[in-house]
Image (tube, grey):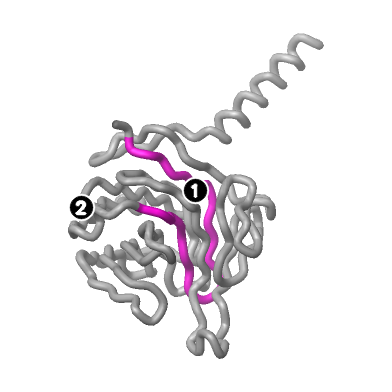
Amino acid sequence: MKRVVLFLCLISFAAVAYADKPAPPETQLVKPGERITFDKLDQEEAFGRKGKPGANGWRAGIGEWSVVDGAGYAKEEGPSEKRPRGHEAVCEHIVDLGDLVLTGEFKLGPAPQVGFVCRDTHQPNHHLGRVLITPSAIWIQKMSGIAKETRKEELKRIKVDIDPNTWHKVTVEVKGDRWLVRVDDHVLEGSHERFLDRKGRVGFVARGEGAQFRNVAIWKAAE
């Protein structure tokens, strides 16, 4: 009996260990190499505070980040003198990467929009590109600038039917001037020379309140 119990414990430990080290995703443009970070976002320690990184390097920036029902929960920043229109919630990982792969899961809930984002290596980091998702559309946009100087250009949009109360998987591949995005079975691709710039921050954003994120990982492209 003791051997059986020990065997079951070892199986359980192995399953947990595997879950903590996800296998690289299936990709088309980029072969995943070194895994930069992974976090289930199910513990408060996942989110750093006041500019400090969390347990696995994620930094809860603008807005409020907490854990609800075992996943990261986003609430955008309300209007203020500094930002009269408020600001979407932002959580990012500081990196120094060229080509990369980002994977994760999201649930919109009552939030109108979520996104997976990159910024460049300027100081401060300028916006570079985004994948934005609503219940009815997914699109890729090229970006530049920061704060009031932010500029954007939509590159590719597709119509979809995203259930806001269901968890969805996302994979973002960045290779050279191309982004390839998969959300469940929806696939779209966009290209722009801006995407060639080195990435200094990679993360996710959410408008409104109630969007959730979990099992987010970043891989450096294999050489």
Relative depth, front residue between 68 and 30: 30
Q: Which residue is mark 1?
A: 216
The N terminus lies in quadrant: top right
Residues under numbered marks 2 and 1 in contact, where contact means CB atoms less than 8 Å apart: no
Q: Position of residue 87 (x, y in %)?
A: 49, 78
Q: In the image, 109: left or right of 132? A: right
The C terminus lies in quadrant: top left
Q: In the image, 148: left or right of 175? A: right
Residue at (23%, 72%) from the top-left corner? Answer: 153
Reading the chain from its start, which is encountered first: label 2 or label 1?
2
Q: Quadrant location of residue 139?
A: bottom left
Relative depth, front residue between 220 and 161: 220
Magenta stretch prevailing secondary structure? strand
Q: Is residue 198 above or below residue 78?
A: above
Relative depth, front residue between 104 and 174: 174
Q: Position of residue 99 (x, y in %)?
A: 30, 44
Residue type at mark 2?
Asp
> Which span is picked out in magenta?
199-221
Q: Quadrant location of residue 59?
A: bottom right
Q: Give the Cα separation between the discs numbered 2 and 1.
A: 23 Å
Is residue 219 on the magenta stretch? yes
Residue at (34%, 44%) from the top-left corner? Answer: 100
Q: Position of residue 140 (x, y in %)?
A: 27, 63
Of marks 2 and 1, the one in the foreground: 2
Q: Residues within 10 Å of mark 2 (few under 14, many from 20)?
A: some
Q: Which numbered tag is attached to residue 23?
A: none
Q: Tag 1's secondary structure?
A: strand
Is residue 173 on the magenta stretch? no
Q: Tag 2's secondary structure?
A: loop
Q: Which residue is mark 2?
A: 177
